[in-house]
């Protein structure tokens, strides 16, 4: 088994994602792969900016969210066949609606807590992982999308969390044992340094 991690620059654009597809296709001929995917380039910074604007009572955060939506919808249009686009966009829109709710809450409170900021920063990887995994499947790379929240457990030290490796390793072993796909490429969204708490609270970083 081989783990490949692609950072924000590697998945910054549809063109770069296609390069990732080519690398995975090549490497997958010899190895079972786990792909760790970051947010699309620049998205994490946009998420942080949206939170800052919202916490200052600046409705400009809505424009930032529109930019994030446009970036991901553009990637879908360029990477996926028309017959798949509507379903994937609907899934992306659900996450974007959740993101909008979070930012609106920050806007109303005029404050952003560490827990909320960590959760906010997780959205980039949640969005990109869906698009990247669908791009793999479109290009005949049999892929299973795994949510990092089902794997990684940390303490509640928001902003600088420590991984509980015992529980995390148990989760990873159990999850990988249950994956059965041809030339098994499991794509695991990497949320920067964001993880899941043992008590199922929102993400930490």
Image (spheres, grey):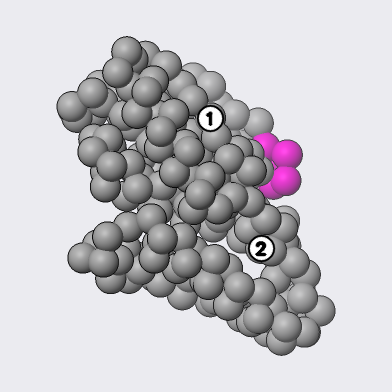
Residue 170 falls left or right of residue 63: left
Is residue 201 visible in the rendered image? The answer is no
Task: Determine the residue positioned at 47% across, 67% down.
Answer: 74
Name the chief secondary structure element in magenta: loop
Provide the residue designation for mark 2: 47
Q: Are marks 1 and 2 in contact (CB under 8 Å)?
A: no
Q: Does the magenta portion include 160?
A: yes
- The stretch in magenta equals 157-161
Q: List x then y, in percent, for residue 16.
A: 53, 45
Q: What crowding class fits label 2: few (fewer than 14 Cα within 10 Å), some (14-19), or many (20 or more)? A: many
Residue 63's label in the rendered image is none
Q: List x then y, in percent, for residue 87.
A: 26, 66
Q: What crowding class fits label 1: few (fewer than 14 Cα within 10 Å), some (14-19), or many (20 or more)? A: some
SS at circle 2: helix
Task: Determine the residue positioned at 46% across, 75% down.
Answer: 97
First in sequence, mark 1 or 2: give its number.
1
Residue 5's label in the rendered image is 1
């Amino acid at each position: 088994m081989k783990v490949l991690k692609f950072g924000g620059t590697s998945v910054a654009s549809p063109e770069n994602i296609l390069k990732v597809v080519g690398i995975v296709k090549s490497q997958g001929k010899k190895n079972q792969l786990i792909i760790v995917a970051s947010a699309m380039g620049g998205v994490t910074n946009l998420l942080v900016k949206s939170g800052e604007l919202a916490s200052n009572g600046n409705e400009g955060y809505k424009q930032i969210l529109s930019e994030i939506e446009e970036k991901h919808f553009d990637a879908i249009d360029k990477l996926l066949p028309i017959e798949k686009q509507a379903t994937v966009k609907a899934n992306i829109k659900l996450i974007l609606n959740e993101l909008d709710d979070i930012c609106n809450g920050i806007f109303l409170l005029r404050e952003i807590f560490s827990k909320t900021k960590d959760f906010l920063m997780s959205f980039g990887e949640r969005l990109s992982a869906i698009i990247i995994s669908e791009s793999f499947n479109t290009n005949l790379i049999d892929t299973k999308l795994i949510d990092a929240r089902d794997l990684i457990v940390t303490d509640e030290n928001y902003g600088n969390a420590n991984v509980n490796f015992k529980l995390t390793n148990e989760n990873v072993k159990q999850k990988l044992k249950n994956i059965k796909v041809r030339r098994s490429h499991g794509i695991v969204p990497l949320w920067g340094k964001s993880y899941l708490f043992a008590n199922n609270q929102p993400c930490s970083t």
